[in-house]
Image (cartoon, grey):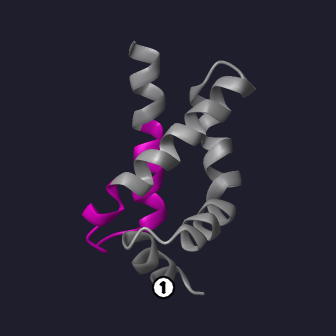
Amino acid sequence: MDLQTIIKACKRDNLKAQSQLYKCYKDDLYLLCLKYCKNKEEAQDNLQDSFLEIFDKMKSYKGTGSFEGWMKRITIHKAIDKYNK
């Protein structure tokens, strides 16, 4: 499946599409988490929390701009929010 098809399926809460999206972007987003977190365990927790929020807010993604950038922004904000707490 191409990215647009995966996004549309994720908006319909398709678990297979969510799994594909996770597999496709987990490594890149994990590396991003490592930059903002204190250790690997915290980065892994942040990655999981970020994907939960990404899937939860998927319907609000309008398709304008970079989808990867949209996911990275959510991931960074998640890490910063945890740091501020």
Residue 71 vs 30, above or below: the answer is: below
Task: Please indicate whether residue 82 sits to the left or right of residue 25 in the image.
Answer: left
Q: Position of residue 39 (x, y in %)?
A: 71, 21
Quadrant into which the C terminus falls = top left
- Describe residue 56's horizontal placement relative to residue 42 as left or right: left
**Among the 4 quarters of the image, the one containing residue 67:** bottom left
Which SS class for mark 1?
Answer: helix
**Label 1: which residue?**
5
The answer to which quarter of the image holds residue 69 is: bottom left
Q: Amino acid at mark 1?
A: Thr
Tell me the quarter of the picture where residue 43 sits. Answer: top right
Q: Which residues are magenta?
A: 57-76
Out of 65 and 50, give the one closest to the viewer. 50
- Could you say which is closer to the camera, residue 24 or residue 80? 24
16 within the magenta span? no
Residue at 64% from the left image edge and 24% from the top image edge:
42
